[in-house]
Amino acid sequence: MIIVVKKDAQESQVESLLTLLKTKNITPSVSKGSLQTIIGCIGDVSRLDPGLIEALEVVESVQRVQEPYKSASRKFHPDPSVVDCGGVPVGGGKFAVIAGPCSVETEEQIVGIAKAVKAAGATMLRGGAFKPRTSPYAFQGLGEEGLRLLSLAKKETGLPIVTELMEFKDIEHFNDVDVIQIGARNMQNFNLLKEVGAYTKKPILLKRGMSATLQELLMSAEYIMASGNPNVILCERGIRTFETALRNTLDLGVVTVLHRLSHLPVVVDPSHATGHAWMVDSVAVAATAIGADGLIIEVHNDPPHAKCDGAQSQTPEMFAGTMKRIKAIRQAI
Ligand code: PEP
Ligand code: MN
């Protein structure tokens, strides 16, 4: 962090600023020019609030030269992280395809879809048991029963399971879950992030909030990591913009930026990003081509009758076609 001191600052004010920095374990390096005094902050500035420093009367401006996240940063961990998801590695060249319905509905549904996506080449099964729905009148998920059905599907197929945790109190039922999803709506539920990070080292699939910047996404990953769980997978699922043609706006360039900023694997969700089943194939292929570490795709055996997100769910046949094109792209790159 670099602090630019106001031109008319008194010597005593600068001295108090230096003392303040030292109490925060920062070693200030002062460079006095004829026009301006600049203070370089040496040390761990991640706990220093730039807004607070900027608010001081003596300070003209503050510039960050270091990201506020450390554990998630590529600078402190140059190699890509490979996260083990119940035996399936993700990241560092290991590509995962997580597929399954938005919500678990019945045993027949989840086991049938699990078998179909596995046959097509998926490496993990998704399915929501606790669902964050916009309407309180919409299907809220089967809860614990949904987790039990996911376990059955895992037993039948051997696919590790990915499912969303909305409230920390439910985690005691997640013993057989391989990857815990924290959804877009909870990305900045900091207490949940802290509690989950301290409780388990199971991989966390952290979905980007619908109006979160990449820095905010990485800070949320940092919450989980700082609490003790280094196994975080980032998920880009599109953000809210003025555009209405797609359910969300997906900027695939984000994958490249996240890979530059962080060592954590980045998975793309073309289903929630587009909201339309017919778009999922091309976006999945594009996400693969740009270098995502995996995809999470909604697949339903009977999309028109799905209890959640039918419009964006691929049929198993569509998914099998997408898998073929993904494999071809993977080989090509
Ligand atoms: C989901 O994966 O079904 C979901 C609700 O996703 P998001 O949190 O990205 O909206
Ligand atoms: Mn969904």
Image (tube, helix red, strand yellow):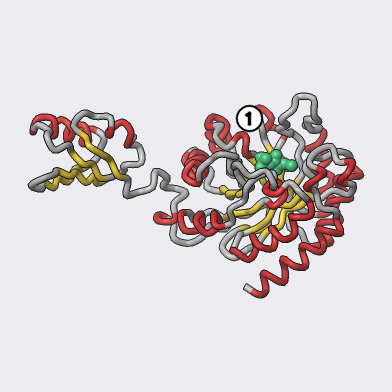
Nearer to us in this view, 18 or 10:
10
Quadrant of ligand 2 in image:
top right
Q: In this figure, what is the number of numbered marks?
A: 1
Left of 115 or right of it: where is 136? left
- Residue 118 in the image: x percent, y percent? 81, 58
Residue 180 showing in the rendered view: no
Q: Residue furthest right?
A: 108
Q: Mark 1 points at which residue?
A: 168
Nearer to us in this view, 333 or 54:
54
Indicate the quadrant where residue 53 lies: top left
Nearer to us in this view, 218 or 224:
218
Left of 54 or right of it: where is 318? right
Kindly identify the residue that appears in the image at 11 percent across and 34 percent down. 8
Indicate the quadrant where residue 167 lies: top right
Residue type at mark 1: give it.
Answer: Phe
Q: How crowded is mark 1: few (under 14 residues within 10 Å), some or many (20 or more)?
A: some
Q: Quadrant of the C terminus?
A: bottom right
| SS assignment at label 1 | helix
- Residue 328 in the image: x percent, y percent? 72, 72
Residue 81 showing in the rendered view: yes
